[in-house]
Image (cartoon, grey):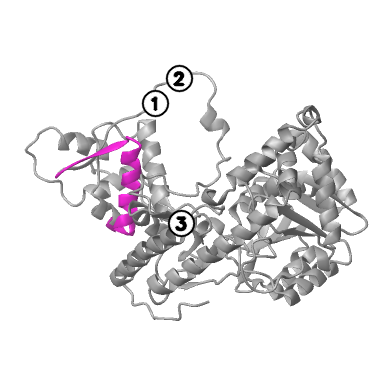
Amino acid sequence: MVHIGGNFPGVLCFRTLCRLRTQTETEQPLPVQYGMLWLMDFAPSLSHESEVPLYRQLYEQIASKIRSGALSPGERLPATRELAGLLGLNRTTVSAAYDMLEAEGLIAGQVGRGSFVTGNAPAVTSGVDWDSLLEGSDVPAAGHSATFGKEVASFVMSRPSRDLFPLDEFRASCEAVLGRQDLATILQLGSPSGYEPLRRHLMEEARRQHLAAPGDDLIVTNGCQQALDLIGRVLLRPGDTVAVEDPVYTGLKHLLTGMGAQLVGIPVGADGMEISHLERVLSRERPRFLVVTSNFQNPTGATLPLNARRALLEAARAARVPVVENDAYGELRYSGAELPAIKQLDEHGGTVLLRSFSKVSFPGLRVGWVVGPKPLIDRLRHAKETADLHTDQLSQAVLLEFAESGRLEAHRSRMLEAGARRLAATLDACRQFLPAGCRWTKPQGGMNLWVRLAEPLDAGELLPRAQREGVAYLPGRYFAVSRLEPGALRLSFAGLAPEQIRNGLAILGRIVADEIAGAPESVEPSSAMV
């Protein structure tokens, strides 16, 4: 934690000093103590352990002072080099914070003079104090709002490329549904369980694949995210423990912590969740439930081997802990042998399976489903009815037509070919452009891979420079549960063309190499393969 503050008799306060500084156009430059005086008056508090990057913490605290009027228009901020030295930060960190302040119109830089507050203090208003009401409900921002340079490659979003969407085939499916005699019924209020023809189709497929036991049922949801939300609503009480992967999908992390759950992270290695660690946690913590991504985990891309799936099931059964298998990426295997789902291996009814159309077809339609024991599905149906009545029936009817016409399987084949090319381009570019000391995972499918930069680099601190040069990614801190990896980052490659991937990683590799060259400690080379 960095904290500077206090009251010092006989020392000019920052605002007084600024007013003296701006009284004349011919004054001499301020002495080096200026930044220290500014810090005494401002007293920023920065946490290196927070998942919010340091540059954003600094930006938010200075912005708050400006908006509250504590820093007045015309007051000068310390030079980036000086402030970085006083706070023990990299100069690029302070520069990134200043860039955000300038982009918001809160400060303005003047050549040869520095950066000055431009104002933007709010007028006094009456009525509802929304800031106070919303205090404590913030979800950490997953990026930096500074302006990009010319965008080369954004590896931020885990989603398919819009260029691969079969729009003509989709239009044909829409036209077929819109021309049906029962269109009025589709447009009417429906069942919380989902559009019944689609629900039956999915249940028949689940039985054919031995994913549904005799006592199981199925509910259609607004994607896997709503499925996770409904499971949390039904099973969790404030303070309950949930075992999750570490690093973990950010949507799950924020969802569960927002419900008051205590997360226990199970480290994820090259072969997915570490089962020996999981066994200890299940025995010691007895969590309310366990969430696991069996195939191509987000963010690492790791897949749980068959023996690990069996061991996980046995450990969960012994501890009497339900398993929630989030298999959103399972249909996107580009190489290697297909593995049975954990749900398929479960002979004791303790597993709930989540799947979705989002990754393999159209994310915007938001259609997923849950297969699990009927008592649980009944409770999920009641919770869904309370939350949103039912999932949009028109989207479900169109997706059913898209599937039954054979268009979905044809599209999936094209997605697998394109995904394989994009993954290969990403792995090749990592080998070609990332310097020695960097490591990365080698998934066989999905949309993401995990990079660990050479020590002592911090992926969050490199992000502003990368964005200025047109490249974006998500730093590892956003996915951390209990193990913060400053040098880690996620690359989501599925939405980018191979040429974009290569160009983006060429830029990122150059930035990383520059930072390694300027690092105060030598970096010991290591293999670039994980």
Residue lying at 33% horizontally and 75% vertically, measured from the top left: 521
Instruction: Please state, as top left, top right, bottom left or bottom right, where the N terminus lies in the image.
Output: bottom left
> Within 10 angstroms of label 1, few (less than 14), some, or many (20 or more) residues?
few
x and y, in percent, of residue 202 in the image: 80, 51
Picture disc at residue 122? 1
Q: Give the range drawn in magenta.
A: 85-112
CA distance for labels 1 and 3:
34 Å
Left of 63 or right of it: where is 310? right
Disc 2 packing (10 Å; few <14; some 14–19; many ≥20)? few
Residue 314 seen by the camera = yes
Judge left or right: residue 277 versus residue 151: right
N-terminal of the pair, mark 2 or mark 3, is 2
CB contact under 8 Å: marks 2 and 1: yes
- Residue appearing at x 9%, y 44% in the figure: 28
Q: Mark 2 points at which residue?
A: 125
Image: 412 above or below 167: below
Q: Disc 1 or 3, which lies upstream in sequence?
A: 1
